[in-house]
Image (cartoon, rainbow, N blue to C red):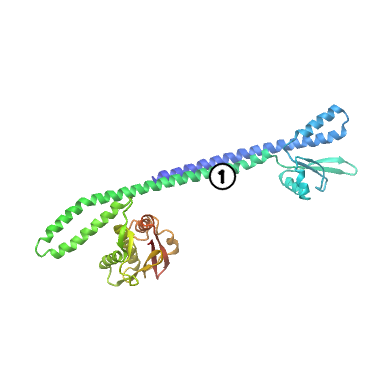
């Protein structure tokens, strides 16, 4: 799937480059051809204007008049040798002269940047010349700007296609992960039921009660993990849960498995009960992931503080460790699926945690602050 995505992207890039390159070359060819044709038309117009001033024959005069009046698209300004407008104007909006007295001079400068003037010698001694500056016609401008317009269209097409392919790719990935998670939960079901039966038998054996009790905790833990995996890809049911109790239970569970030199503290600001709408197993998963990350960061010794506070419209949970911190270049990647700095791990814990909080509980999960060598604080914001 990933290779197909990159192949599609490469193919689109090649097609786009080919289209744009071909369009640019062909449009450039057409614009040069049109520019040469328009220059020839202007030259003919100038010559007919010069001829009209010299002929007396009516037929010749009618012909030159027909030629000079034929040009209706190319704007032309006649100037003296110093580029001062001094005579004929063609296809120029003279109404703008009343608004701006320098309008013609500005147009001369504009035309000068587009085309070289056609110079006509009016008198030899003394030498008098006229210059004829002309601009691009509407058709020529359209041909020149056509590659830019087509480039924008092609870019938009590629962008839409890439977004569609990326969305489809992500959707397929999500379906694969959800399918794998549900299948894992399904496969765990049978051995879990068997283990639970064996634990019940162990309870009845004299002297095995303590072992059976501890084994039952691990079996219940496996059932919880299986239940979490079964809920991936589906809309979990939210119910009223005591947030303080949920967090304290998870802290107690992690604490039993953590090094003795790591201290755990839950600061609930004196609140004993704080009910929120949540999915208990999935919310536990989030807290477990954050605590495990804090443990990995603090390594052999340190402290982990879970702070819970209530605000006017929200409930804040902050998990702070005194560990190694997160580098700035990694801060933008820690919630991306597959990203991990650990030697072992899939890099899915924080990604799934963010999804659980933001999509299923309509809250927020982000890094509040982190400093190398001093620790990190993750912040969860839940609506009341």
Q: Position of residue 215 (x, y in %)?
A: 18, 61
Q: Position of residue 274 (x, y in %)?
A: 32, 66
Q: Identify the residue at horizontal 57%, vertical 39% (top origin).
A: 22
Label count reads: 1
Is any atom of residue 347 visible in this view? no
Q: Position of residue 348 (x, y in %)?
A: 35, 56
Question: Is 283 in front, or is 326?
Answer: 283
Q: Identify the residue at horizontal 78%, vertical 47% (top origin).
A: 97
Q: Residue furthest right?
A: 125
Q: Position of residue 115 (x, y in %)?
A: 73, 43
Q: Is residue 354 left or right of residue 253?
A: right
Tell me: residue 31, above or below residue 307.
above
Question: Considering the numbered disc 1 on the image, is that residue within a helix, a strand or a loop?
Answer: helix
Q: Identify the residue at horizontal 42%, vertical 47% (top origin).
A: 167
Tell me: residue 375, above or below residue 41.
below
Question: Which quarter of the picture shows residue 90?
Answer: top right
């Amino acid at each position: 799937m990933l290779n197909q995505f990159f192949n599609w992207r490469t193919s689109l890039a090649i097609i786009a480059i080919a289209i744009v390159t071909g369009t640019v070359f062909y449009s450039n060819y057409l614009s040069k051809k049109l520019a040469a044709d328009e220059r020839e038309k202007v030259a003919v117009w100038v010559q007919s204007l010069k001829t009209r001033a010299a002929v007396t024959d009516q037929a010749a005069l009618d012909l030159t008049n027909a030629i000079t009046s034929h040009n209706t698209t190319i704007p032309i300004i006649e100037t003296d040798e110093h580029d001062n407008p001094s005579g004929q104007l063609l296809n120029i909006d003279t109404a703008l002269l009343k608004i701006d007295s320098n309008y013609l001079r500005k147009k001369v400068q504009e035309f000068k940047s587009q085309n070289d003037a056609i110079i006509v010698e009016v008198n030899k001694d003394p030498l008098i010349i006229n210059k004829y500056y002309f601009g691009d016609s509407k058709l020529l401008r359209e041909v020149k700007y056509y590659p830019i317009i087509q480039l924008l269209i092609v870019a938009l097409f590629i962008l839409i296609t890439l977004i569609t392919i990326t969305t489809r790719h992500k959707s397929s990935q999500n379906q694969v992960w959800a399918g794998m998670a549900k299948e894992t939960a399904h496969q765990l079901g049978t051995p879990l039921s068997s283990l639970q039966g064996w634990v019940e038998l162990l309870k009845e054996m004299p002297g095995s009660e303590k072992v059976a009790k501890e084994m039952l905790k691990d079996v219940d833990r496996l059932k919880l993990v299986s239940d979490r995996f079964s809920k991936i890809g589906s809309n979990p049911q939210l119910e009223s849960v005591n947030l303080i109790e949920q967090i304290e239970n998870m802290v107690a569970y992690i604490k039993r498995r953590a090094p003795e030199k790591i201290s755990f503290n839950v600061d609930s600001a004196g609140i004993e009960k704080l009910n929120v709408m949540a999915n208990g197993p999935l919310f536990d998963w989030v807290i477990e992931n954050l605590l495990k990350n804090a443990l990995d960061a603090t390594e052999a010794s340190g402290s982990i503080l879970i702070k819970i506070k209530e605000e006017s419209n929200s409930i804040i949970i902050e998990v702070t460790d005194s560990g190694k911190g997160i580098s700035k270049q990694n801060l933008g990647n820690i919630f991306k699926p597959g990203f991990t700095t650990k030697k072992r791990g899939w890099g899915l814990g924080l990604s799934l945690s963010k999804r659980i909080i933001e999509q299923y509980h309509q809250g927020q999960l982000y890094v509040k602050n982190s400093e190398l060598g001093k620790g990190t604080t993750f912040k969860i914001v839940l609506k009341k």
